[in-house]
Image (tube, rainbow, N blue to C red):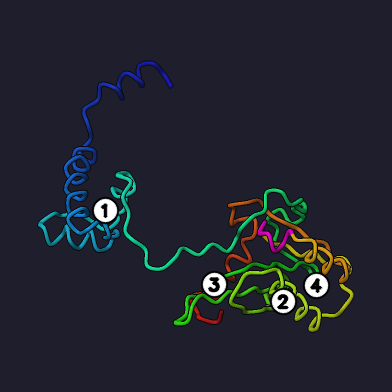
Amino acid sequence: MAPSTYYDVKSRCPSARARRDAELGPALRVIWEDNYRVYGAVKLWKAARRGGHDVGRDQVARLMRSLGIEGVRRGKRVTTTRADPAAPRHPDLVKRQFTATAPNQLWVTDLTFVPTWVGVAYVCFIVDAFSRLIVGWRAASNMRTTMVLDALEMARWSRGNTLSGLRCHSDAGSQFTSIRYGERLAELGAVPSIGSVGDSFDNALAERACLIDCVSGWA
């Protein structure tokens, strides 16, 4: 950055947006606190509009992030990927190339969840990258490794007991780094592949299937 640019920015008058944010920020915080600090962006936006503030919903959400305030969530936050830092991880054999020229070359697998009236239901599924077909799945009330193994058993029943050259890609959840999961894949002649932690693009095909299943209610 040129020195003249730096000093120009430092001496420049606040923009219209910055002045507007400086006015709206404290007002939104007051409304949020007056409502017991439970309002999220949508409710806070509607309350601000009722209070005479000409503000957009996205602007409210942006200001809430800058102010460090958020609404209260109902229920518990569900986490499906729980990485085990001590467990050895298999290499990433996919590198975000979710393509295959024939069936049983690349499978992707992941876990998702669906809230129900009686609790949270967890689903493990396996997708063939060639046909985008779900070749194995299992629903359970927990996220133990057993449900992943059951999904593998269903895939083996539908696709065969020997699948040499198959890569089975997943995230770094502890279910997929377990010894039993690796042994079950070895029985099939398959090799495990694991993407990086906290990066949905490294398991994009399975993440997309998660989203579709949750929206459609299939899971």
Q: Residue at x 78, y 78 (%)?
A: 153
Distance in Å between CA atoms under marks 4 and 1: 48 Å
Displayed quadrant of residue 174: bottom right
Q: Residue at x 71, y 48 (%)?
A: 86
> Which residue is under mark 1?
60
Residue 191 is left or right of residue 80, and the answer is right
Three-letter code for the amino acid on which mark 2 is drawn: Ala
The first of marks 3 and 1 along the sequence is 1
Three-letter code for the amino acid on which mark 3 is drawn: Phe
Distance in Å between CA atoms under marks 3 and 1: 29 Å
Distance in Å between CA atoms under marks 3 and 2: 15 Å
Write down the region rendered in magenta: 172-177
Q: Are marks 3 and 2 in contact (CB under 8 Å)?
A: no
Identify the secondary structure beneath mark 3.
strand
Which disc is residue 151 wearing? 2
Q: State the quadrant of the C terminus.
A: bottom right
> Which residue is under mark 3?
113
Which disc is residue 103 wearing? none
Three-letter code for the amino acid on which mark 4 is drawn: Asn
Which disc is residue 104 wearing? 4
Q: Are marks 4 and 3 in contact (CB under 8 Å)?
A: no
201, 89: nearer the viewer: 89
Three-letter code for the amino acid on which mark 1 is drawn: Val
Residue 198 is left or right of residue 119, and the answer is right
